[in-house]
Amino acid sequence: MKKYDYLIVGSGLFGATCANLLSKKGNKILVIDKRNNIGGNVYTENIEGINVHKYGAHIFHTSDDKVWEYVNNFAKLNRFTNSPIAIYKDEVYNLPFNMNTFSKIWKDVFTPADALRHIEEEKQEIKKEPKNLEEQAISLVGRTIYEKLIKEYTEKQWGKKCNELPAFIIKRLPVRFTYDNNYFDDKYQGIPIGGYTKMVENMLEGIEIKLNTDFSSDKSLKNIANKIIYTGAIDEYFDYKLGELEYRTLKFENKILDVENYQGNAVVNFTSSNVKYTRIIEHKHFENVENNPKTIITYEYPLKYQKNMERYYTVNDEKNNLLAKQYKELASKEKNVYFGGRLGNYKYYDMDDVIKEAMLLCENI
């Protein structure tokens, strides 16, 4: 008899959801994580009375009633509305692209019809099927918006020129002809009051957890459970036998400042190439921390992934997707091993998608 019914590799949202749902069915679960904390990339740490998003800003949003109801079992979410701004050189713009953005870019824009006229005129530059990201973006929003708010930011983010990136990375761009700065269209959005770590702790209540435990370096772990749910990198699971998948990583630089309010917003993007970071996060705005004379900001720098770094973004171009498909074919032949999450499926997911996929997996097994 194996010691556990399920070994779950990774304590992020996918692993925590699976652990919670399967334990409710009476299964004996062990959750392991190579980090020294639970929560994966949604981990938050309280510093100076502020819940700091240690691995980048995470705003929960969904239109799925079932997912929203599920997460509210473990945390009360506030009414945070994501309204980021973008700074291009000495200009400030609202995101997503809306009437506030257009009226500042073009001085003769007062109505949606005025904005649409400019965008439609500029879109005519691309008269054929877009072959790369640059052509795709211009075909959607025109050159002016592309050059101020997309081009240099995207090149920083991906480490490649826009005309070298595939068109499908930007399949669509949110363009709103209203004065609405809410970034998401979803029915629900918010931040767990008290931080994501507390929410994940509640999800994993009563479940055995081992931190600082690396599945890839301890093969004996494969033998302690009847089934494995693996949320790590799929190519690492197979010892890179087909080659390495490409990822992007991030470097975070945190500062504690003796000011009450540094930038007036939770997320500020810097879209010009003369600024090396892509955004500054001011964490106290996520939960409206009041009467705190200090603030904490994080500069976010995108980097090329190298081994032993954290993987943040999958590079879903044609070459990598083909390799990922081959790995998924290998994964389908693994007996009693299930792969999930961004890294396990080599796919970009929002948080609600991660939870939905975990729910579906637990129903199927």
Image (cartoon, rainbow, N blue to C red):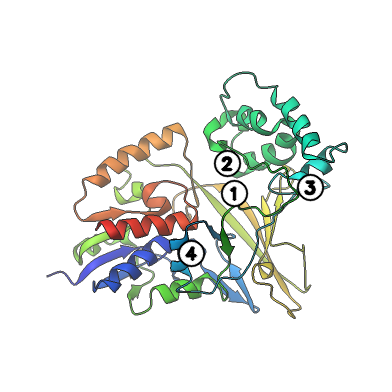
Residue 301, horizontal then vertical, whole percent: 62, 52
Mark 3 → mark 2, Cα distance in angstroms: 27 Å
Under mark 1, the amino acid is Pro
Mark 4 → mark 3, Cα distance in angstroms: 30 Å
In the displayed structure, does residue 123 sit left or right of residue 333?
right
Query: Which of the labelled discs sits on residue 100, or is there none?
Result: 3
Residue 132, horizontal then vertical, whole percent: 57, 28
Query: Which of the labelled discs sits on residue 201, or is there none?
Result: none
Mark 4 → mark 2, Cα distance in angstroms: 32 Å
- Residue on which disc 4 sits: 68
In the displayed structure, does residue 189 sit left or right of residue 239?
right
Mark 4 and mark 3 lie on one chain; the one further toward the N terminus is: 4
Q: Residues within 10 Å of mark 1 (few under 14, many from 20)?
A: many
**Does residue 231 appear in the picture of this structure?**
no
Q: Are marks 1 and 3 in contact (CB under 8 Å)?
A: no
Mark 4 and mark 2 lie on one chain; the one further toward the N terminus is: 4
Mark 1 → mark 4, Cα distance in angstroms: 31 Å
Query: Which of the labelled discs sits on residue 158, or is there none?
Result: 2
Mark 1 and mark 2 lie on one chain; the one further toward the N terminus is: 2
Query: Given this view, does label 4 or label 2 mark the residue nearer the observer?
Result: 4
Mark 1 and mark 3 lie on one chain; the one further toward the N terminus is: 3
Q: Residues within 10 Å of mark 2 (few under 14, many from 20)?
A: some
Q: Are marks 4 and 3 in contact (CB under 8 Å)?
A: no
Mark 1 → mark 2, Cα distance in angstroms: 8 Å
Q: Residues within 10 Å of mark 4 (few under 14, many from 20)?
A: some
Residue at point 51%, 67% (across, down): 43
Mark 1 → mark 3, Cα distance in angstroms: 28 Å
